[in-house]
Amino acid sequence: MRTGRQQIAIFLLTPLLALPSHGAAGTGTAGEANRYVHVLRVGETLRDVAREHYGSASYVRVVELVNDLSGPVDLEPGSRIRVPSLDALLADEGVSPVMPLETYTLLETRSSFLEVEDRLRALARDQGTGYVEIPGDVRAVLREAAGKMWDVAMALRVVKPEVRIIPNRAICQLKAISFQLNRISYGALDPRCHDLDVVHEKLAWAICNLVVWARNGYRYR
């Protein structure tokens, strides 16, 4: 088994252009840029937009950050809401260029969690006791994801030439995600799936904190 440091070394030898995309957004041509925009429908809220494009309403704070919105807003149907993929967002905001491995691992781990999330929600609803028996393959995914989130948090603590102050807020969120994924792997799942929503909630905060950190010259904690 390779250690985290060995994996990092191998990754850094891989051309960044070879990394897969973690969202629907394309490469930035005029036609593909339209995929970054959601036209608000009647009765839709920003939470609905976040759920449709990012898989959870918890990412509403990402939508608000990208569109420079704060607090409750009353948007008219037909309003155009920017919804870049998360990899495009982190690249455009300057996070990925400074932290390429950390960003890639973060989004790859999020994708792994999304792949098993529906199964976990079904288990939580069916058993309804607050504790469920997690299938072995799902448990393995969760524990690997927990380890990777912790590795990303630790890697963000390493000072780089471009970094003035490490992103402590994002680091704390990622550590919390690691703990939460481990809890879920042991079967801690309430029937309303709040335990799963917490993962997305903290991921959204981590991503927003990384964006704000980059916007402030890599010095905002």
Image (tube, rainbow, N blue to C red):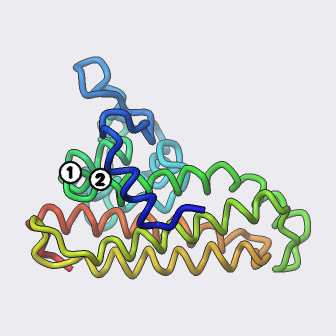
Rendering coords of residue 99 (x, y %): 26, 59
Task: Using the image as rendered, state which of residue 200 and residue 138 is in the foreground.
Answer: 138
Is residue 114 toward the left or the right of residue 161 in the image?
A: right
Viewport quadrant of the N terminus: bottom right
Q: Which residue is mark 1?
A: 97
Rendering coords of residue 183 (x, y %): 68, 80
Residue for point 29% across, 27% down:
27
Amino acid type at circle 1 is Pro
Farthest residue, direction right: 127
Count the marks: how many?
A: 2
Rendering coords of residue 194 (x, y %): 66, 73
Q: Are marks 1 and 2 in contact (CB under 8 Å)?
A: yes
Residue for point 75% across, 79% down:
188
Q: Which residue is mark 2?
A: 100
Disc marking residue 134: none
* Crowd class of label 1 (few under 14; some 14 to 19; many from 20; radius 10 Å): few
Is residue 209 toward the left or the right of residue 47 in the image?
A: left
